[in-house]
Image: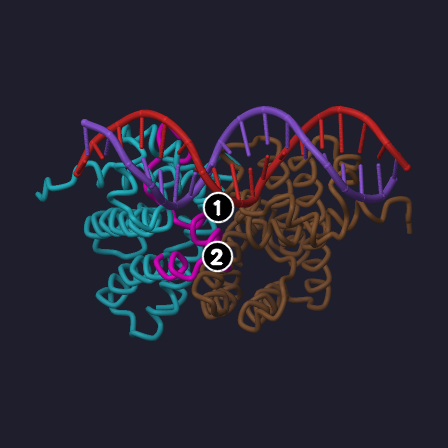
Chain colours: A brown, B cyan, C red, D purple
Amino acid sequence: MDNKSDTRDRFIRTASMLFQLQGYHATGLNEILKKSGAPRGSFYYHFPNGKEELALEAIKLASQTIQLDIKNTLDQFSDPGEAIKFQIEKIAAFITKEKKIEDFSISLLALETFASNESLRKACESAFISFESIYLEKLIVAGFDKEKACELSMVIQSMIEGGIVLSLTMKNGSQLLAVAKQISVILKANA
Amino acid sequence: MDNKSDTRDRFIRTASMLFQLQGYHATGLNEILKKSGAPRGSFYYHFPNGKEELALEAIKLASQTIQLDIKNTLDQFSDPGEAIKFQIEKIAAFITKEKKIEDFSISLLALETFASNESLRKACESAFISFESIYLEKLIVAGFDKEKACELSMVIQSMIEGGIVLSLTMKNGSQLLAVAKQISVILKANA
DNA sequence: GTCTATAAGCAGATAGAC
DNA sequence: GTCTATCTGCTTATAGAC
């Protein structure tokens, strides 16, 4: 429990949510300041490199939170197909209800920065790789050989991120539910 | 061939490329003006509702271009698995070479606008639905029943969009190639 | 229809008091 | 460490000449 900078953490948590929902460029510093309840000077004390430094921390936080969430869900099932299906259905339910924003994707940040900001792009890349590694591990434990598991975890990750993009755009979780139904099918076909 | 407004079309083509690559919020009007080679006043004559009206047209153009591209590829193969695999490999090759920007995804625009701009969100939704319909049609012609084809086209669309997000972020096409390899597997497992 | 000049406001960032 | 006032530059949009 390091309480040495609650202010800094609050900036990061606020920014992480806003960047995931609205994007990096659409979220102004004023909005972050207002929602964090902290003044301008405090911000530049904690983040001398400004908005980009904040975004880097925000991406890292989102990455950690999402990793924990995936791990927790996957640990509740021994069968990887069942586990991943449940994880996707959870996200679909969230999008359908849309009562509040949660951590589930950094795709917007990734697409906004891949061509223009190498530092943030790399942070997103690391995040995606760490998500993929969790699925990979689960598949290996379930008996898939390493090469096959690697390929399948890429495909699963693609299905999830794509399903999120489509479900958010269409404002309902049906795309993600269709994806969820196919996870076990793919795993069995590749067993 | 309506030549009645070449200027207007050039605005739309320029904006379509820039919005897809950098996003709506990261692309300023000045940049669009400069790259279009047309002055400010001309822009507001053609688009009285400003940047948002331009974005709407840009999304429609991107949608049409992508639809045509998908249709052309799919018509070259009788087997839907082979056809879709080839389409994905084409996108993967483009991302790997990255010599120039092409029309292949409006995911960035969709994620930027789904929560903040209903008009642009709907345009993106329509675009996604029209892409999905092309895959759907191909599956139905190949003998899948309507319900199954509908579900599978959603999954395929998710895999492609997700694969694009990941491949762009990682700066290589391997995620998309992994997706391409699984298309036929999924179709056979659902036949 | 085309163009320039400029308005009005907001962005990110800084200076310096406390 | 915290706060306010302010700078500079860029944003979208408008006015009005041609």
Question: Residue at horizontal 70%, vertical 48%?
Answer: A33
Q: Nearer the viewer, residue A175 or A183?
A: A175
Count residues near mark 1 (Cα–Cα under 10 Å), then give few for <14, some for 14-19, many for 20+.
Answer: many
Q: Tell me residue B169's x, y (percent).
A: 52, 39
Q: Which of A170 and B57 is in front in this view?
A: B57
Q: Are marks 1 and 2 in contact (CB under 8 Å)?
A: yes
Badge 1 sits on which subunit? B
Name the secondary structure under disc 1: helix
Question: Residue at horizontal 59%, vertical 65%?
Answer: A91
Q: In this view, does C15 lie above or below A55?
A: above
Q: Where is residue D2, by image quadrant? A: top right
Q: Give the range drawn in magenta.
A: B95-123
Name the secondary structure under disc 2: helix
The span from disc 1 to disc 2 (Cα, nearest Å) is 10 Å
Question: Residue at horizontal 35%, vertical 47%?
Answer: B50
Count residues near mark 2 (Cα–Cα under 10 Å), then give few for <14, some for 14-19, many for 20+.
Answer: many
Residue B9 is labelled as none
Tell me which amino acid carries mark 1: Val
Residue B77 appears anywhere in the view: yes
Q: In this view, does A8 lie above or below B124?
A: above
Tell me which amino acid carries mark 2: Val
Q: Which of A139 and A106 is in front in this view?
A: A106
Considering the image in quadrants, where does the C terminus of chain B appear?
A: bottom left
Question: Residue at horizontal 43%, vertical 49%?
Answer: B109
Position of residue B7 in the picture relative to residue A140 (left or right): left
Q: Tell me residue A142's x, y (percent).
A: 65, 59
Q: Name the residue under label 2.
A: A165
How many badges with numbers are in the image? Answer: 2
Q: Name the residue under label 1.
A: B165
